Amino acid sequence: MTTTAAMWEARAADGRAADLAAWVRGTALPALRGSAGLVRTELFGAPGDRVLLITWWAGERPVPVADPPAELLGRPVHRWSFTSEHVE
């Protein structure tokens, strides 16, 4: 079976990184829970007020993460999907 990692990355509006991360925890993640194929989620913070969510899926069709409210964003959300090539 294919494993797909879906990456969702956003830069928060100035000073709003904590609010953006809270939105992911309180809105985006609950919306994904129970989705068919969801294996794992991981939330990261990064310099530059960036918030990164990686979701792992069994199969090739991850459920997309919604866009947060515009006032939390410093720029549009970026999204990428990857399929697993090798695991050790």
Image: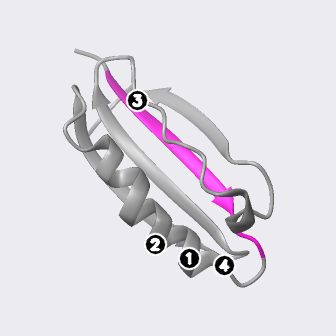
Which residues are drawn in magenta?
A: 3-13
Q: Quadrant of residue 47?
A: bottom right
Q: Kindly state the secondary structure of the residue where label 4 is placed.
A: loop
Q: Are marks 4 and 2 in contact (CB under 8 Å)?
A: no
Please tell me the numbered disc located at residue 22: 2
Q: Are marks 2 and 1 in contact (CB under 8 Å)?
A: yes
Find the distance from the CA under tag 1 to the CA under tag 3.
23 Å
Find the distance from the CA under tag 2 to the CA under tag 3.
20 Å
Q: Amino acid at mark 3?
A: Val
Q: Residue at x 66, y 79 (%)?
A: 16
> Of 82 and 64, which appears nearest the observer?
64
Compared across the picture, whether 75 is left or right of 43 comes to right
Q: Are marks 2 and 3 in contact (CB under 8 Å)?
A: no
> Of 38 and 20, which appears nearest the observer?
20
Q: Which residue is outermost to the bottom?
A: 15
Compared across the picture, whether 34 is left or right of 18 comes to left
